[in-house]
Image (spheres, rainbow, N blue to C red):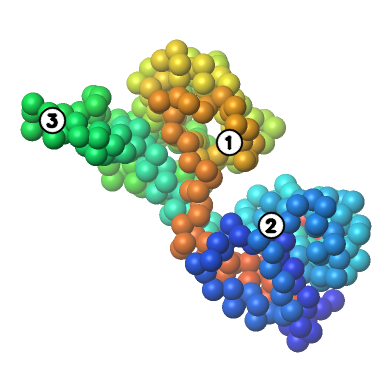
């Protein structure tokens, strides 16, 4: 066991996405002998972490084979909510706690949901390009639109998964005077004013906007597929800031091309970074951002704080946010 007085060896294998240069590392570096790498590929992980007692990871995978080659390892910190990059069974066998961070990005993700939605409905970027290209200067009218512009007021926001982020999305939707419906695992426990809980078919059929926020599991993989897309309104928008695996991307492409739904805004894909020939690329009614909904400066500041506090708690012998079984 190590303590806060032992100047522990800490290695962060892939710190760039958390801090590309606009945050202060000192809260972490004050904890011990700290080495931070921007990125670590598979061949570098063991070599860089072999002397470390504490290892932090975001997407660098700690497999059973790699954990076995790290004899000094006593703690794994995941600088994210999801922890599928770590072999939890292997960590538990070595009595190594794996600690994650949750609820740091709620405001930013909810904000991004509406950034995607408003770009789909108001096409601010396209109108700006049109103006910059001289279309307004040469227009015969004082105003013009590139498409019919819908209002969100009185439309129905459907939310799949009413956790912290889903609830924040509901708050914003209600501020837009939208009706809010939700498919959620615990409707009685999590009942709240302004939200009507519905079944899956109702969610699909009635949503003018469907925003995905449920955790990904084998049971809900491809929640959005050819069948579910056919149930949606042709005027509906799909927003995914959850997990790429919630959507069958080839089916979504087909639905967008066929006009089965109006448009989609996605911040997550099933493979990240995606292949150059990804099926959702090149569609005029599909907006894609590179998994940035979580990445506001404020969210990353909260994430760093949580991860530092996790380490402090571990060094005091009181590990928190532990996601595996330890003795």
* In front of the other: 5 or 218: 5
Against 323, residue 230 (above or below) is: above
Q: Which mark is residue 39?
A: 2
Q: Write the residue at 28% across / 37% down.
A: 129
- The disc at residue 269 is 1
How far across and down, in percent of the image, does residue 29 sit? Answer: 65, 77
Percent x, y of residue 324: 77, 55
Q: What is the CA distance from the residue labelled 1 to the residue labelled 2?
A: 20 Å
User: Which quadrant is the N terminus positioned in?
Assistant: bottom right
Pinpoint residue 121: horizontal percent, then vertical percent.
31, 32
Along the line of sight, which residue is nearer the eye, 295 or 157? 295
Badge nearest the viewer, 3 or 2: 3
Residue indicated by mark 3:
138
Name the image quarter holding residue 20: bottom right
User: Which residue lies at the image location 72% right of the left edge and 47% below the top edge?
Assistant: 84
Depth check: 82 or 293 in front? 293
Q: Using the rendered image of the protein, determine whether residue 9 is visible from the camera's viewpoint.
A: yes
What is the distance, in whole Å, between disc 3 and disc 1 at their CAs?
40 Å
Q: Quadrant of residue 33?
A: bottom right
- SS of the residue at dot 1? loop
Classify residue 44 as left or right of residue 284. right
Question: Residue at left 81%, top 64%?
Answer: 49
Disc with the residue nearer the chain's start (3 vs 2): 2
Q: Can residue 189 be seen in this view?
A: no
| Residue in the image at 53% along x and 66% along y | 21
Badge 3 or badge 1: first in the primary sequence: 3
Q: Are marks 1 and 2 in contact (CB under 8 Å)?
A: no
Q: Is residue 121 left or right of residue 160?
A: left
């Amino acid at each position: 066991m190590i303590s806060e007085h032992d100047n522990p060896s800490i290695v962060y294998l892939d710190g760039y996405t958390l801090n590309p240069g606009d945050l202060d590392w000192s809260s972490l570096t004050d904890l011990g002998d700290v080495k931070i790498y921007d990125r670590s590929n598979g061949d570098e992980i063991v070599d860089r972490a072999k002397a470390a007692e504490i290892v932090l990871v975001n997407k660098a995978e700690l497999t059973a084979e790699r954990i076995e080659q790290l004899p000094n390892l006593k703690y794994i910190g995941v600088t994210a909510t999801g922890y599928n990059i770590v072999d939890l069974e292997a960590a538990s066998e070595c009595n190594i706690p794996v600690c994650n961070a949750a609820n740091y990005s709620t405001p930013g993700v909810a904000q991004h949901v509406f950034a995607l939605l408003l770009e789909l409905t108001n096409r601010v970027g396209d109108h700006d390009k049109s103006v910059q290209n001289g279309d307004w200067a040469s227009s015969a009218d004082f105003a013009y639109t590139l498409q019919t512009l819908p209002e969100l007021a009185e439309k129905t926001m459907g939310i799949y998964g009413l956790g912290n982020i889903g609830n924040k999305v509901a708050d914003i939707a209600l501020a837009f005077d939208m009706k809010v419906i939700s498919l959620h695992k615990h409707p009685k426990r999590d009942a709240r004013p302004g939200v009507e809980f519905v079944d899956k078919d109702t969610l699909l059929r009635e949503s003018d906007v469907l925003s995905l926020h449920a955790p990904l599991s084998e049971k809900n993989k491809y929640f959005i597929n050819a069948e579910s897309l056919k149930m949606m309104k042709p005027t509906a928008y799909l927003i995914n800031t959850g997990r790429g695996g919630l959507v069958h991307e080839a089916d979504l492409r087909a639905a967008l091309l066929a006009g089965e739904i109006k448009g989609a805004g996605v911040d997550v894909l099933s493979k990240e970074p995606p292949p150059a020939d990804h099926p959702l690329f090149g569609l005029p009614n599909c907006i894609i951002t590179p998994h940035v909904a979580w990445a506001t400066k404020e969210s990353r500041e909260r994430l760093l704080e949580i991860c530092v506090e996790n380490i402090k708690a571990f060094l005091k012998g009181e590990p928190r946010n532990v996601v595996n079984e330890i003795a």
